[in-house]
Image: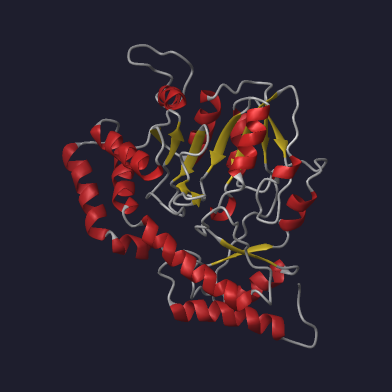
């Protein structure tokens, strides 16, 4: 069996080649000026994010995980508080709630892999909702905000996977109290290392900026904080890539729609919400025989991933849909510069797998 990778899950070097002159210039300028932390470079990048998202303010961060922790603290989440969230997500979402001493209250997911807004419940200890734009589009944010308003809850959007998405025509980043972004290299807008940001209401962003800088205000330490600042090289690289991100997303959408058209009668393909623009951070199909299909595609030189193999909830938590999908989801290569003949091979390999033998596999 041939295990060599012909079609990788991502092509980060190809992305670099598209911005090589700009990124190389950013690197040399950073070194030449010894411009490594804070100052005009960071402020300029934050202004670009404010302009892009339409948010009141922005705090750039060292990572998406640090963005979540500081956002929770900025809205006043304290030990013992409860936060509604989901368990089908990257572990940083749940981790951040636990890191500030709060308790995650898990809501099951809907057909879009998002927080099921029909299953939101209130308790006296509940202080906030932390929802996730899983895979690149948003849940019904208006419904979440209606519930939050009724019970005077704060709302944070974990938009690590949805940079560039829109909700009812408005860019993600300005829709709730605070929005957190990850600029991990694999994200829609990716750094060359870890980076992140928080956007939203200025009164909270001001607190995030204190927390990310060891809790320091203009003069003295005000609270226990973190070393959570972005480094200027990453800020400069992200600024250069920002001008291309919308076209890259459109390219990913073209690949995704081609997959869906070809595979919709063979596997369960992603659904697009009527209210949100899907950015396809990852293109996720669902099948009953996920592990076997993954091995088969690997034998054809196609690299796939699983987002995510385990929920972040305990065994005694009743979220049946969340626990059902983790054994069935499989992410296919989906990036704007994926050659068409590679797309064809992925499609045809899946068709080949489901037509082999007398018994049809899976779904």
Residue shown at 54%/53% (left/top)?
276
How far across and down, in percent of the image, does residue 76 sit?
Answer: 56, 21
Above or below 206: residue 67: below
Above or below 318: residue 273: below
Above or below 196: residue 14: below
Above or below 123: residue 358: below
How far across and down, in percent of the image, does residue 230 sit?
Answer: 37, 36
Evaluate whether residue 284 shows in this view. Answer: yes
Residue shown at 46%/81% (left/top)?
341
Protein image colouring: secondary structure
How far across and down, in percent of the image, does residue 333 sit?
Answer: 52, 67
In the displayed structure image, the side of residue 153 where residue 176 appears, left or right: left
Q: Which residue ends up furthest to the left in the rendered image?
A: 32
- In the rendered image, which quarter contains the N terminus? bottom right
Evaluate whether residue 128 shows in this view. Answer: no
- In the rendered image, which quarter contains the C terminus? bottom right
Q: Quadrant of residue 324?
A: bottom right
Q: Which residue ends up furthest to the bottom in the rendered image?
A: 358
In the displayed structure image, the side of residue 110 where residue 233 appears, left or right: left
Q: Nearer the viewer, residue 167 or 280?
A: 167
Q: Nearer the viewer, residue 173 or 105?
A: 173
């Amino acid at each position: 069996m041939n295990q060599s990778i012909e079609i990788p899950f991502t092509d980060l070097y190809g992305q670099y080649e598209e911005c090589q002159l700009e990124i190389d210039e950013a690197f040399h300028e950073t070194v030449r000026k010894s411009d490594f932390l804070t100052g005009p470079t960071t402020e300029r990048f934050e202004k670009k994010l404010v302009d892009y998202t339409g948010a009141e303010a922005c705090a750039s961060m060292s990572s998406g995980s640090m963005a979540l922790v500081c956002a929770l603290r900025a809205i006043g989440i304290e030990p013992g508080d409860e936060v509604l969230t989901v368990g089908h997500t990257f572990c940083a979402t749940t981790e951040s709630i636990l890191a500030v001493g709060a308790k995650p209250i898990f809501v099951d997911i809907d057909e879009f892999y998002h927080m099921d807004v029909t299953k939101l419940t209130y308790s006296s200890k509940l202080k906030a909702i932390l929802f996730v734009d899983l895979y690149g589009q948003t849940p019904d944010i208006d419904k979440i905000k209606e519930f939050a308003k009724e019970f005077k809850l704060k709302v944070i959007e974990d938009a690590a996977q949805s940079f560039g998405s829109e909700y009812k025509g408005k860019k993600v980043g300005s829709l709730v109290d605070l929005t957190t972004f990850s600029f991990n290299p694999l994200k829609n807008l990716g750094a060359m290392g870890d980076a992140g940001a928080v956007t939203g209401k200025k009164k909270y962003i001001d607190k995030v900026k204190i927390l990310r800088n060891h809790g320091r205000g203009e003069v003295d330490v005000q609270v226990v904080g973190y070393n959570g600042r972005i480094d200027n090289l990453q800020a400069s690289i992200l600024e250069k890539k920002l001008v291309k991100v919308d076209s890259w997303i459109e390219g990913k959408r073209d690949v995704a729609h081609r997959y869906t058209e070809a595979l919709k009668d063979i596997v369960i393909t992603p659904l697009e919400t009527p209210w949100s623009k899907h950015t396809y951070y990852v293109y996720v199909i669902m099948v009953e025989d996920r592990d076997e299909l993954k091995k088969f595609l690997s034998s054809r030189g196609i690299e796939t991933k699983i987002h995510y193999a385990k929920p972040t909830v305990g065994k005694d938590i009743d979220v049946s849909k969340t626990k059902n999908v983790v054994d069935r989801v499989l992410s296919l290569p989906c990036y704007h510069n994926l050659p068409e003949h590679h797309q064809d091979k992925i499609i045809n390999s899946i068709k080949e797998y489901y037509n082999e033998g007398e018994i049809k596999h899976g779904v």
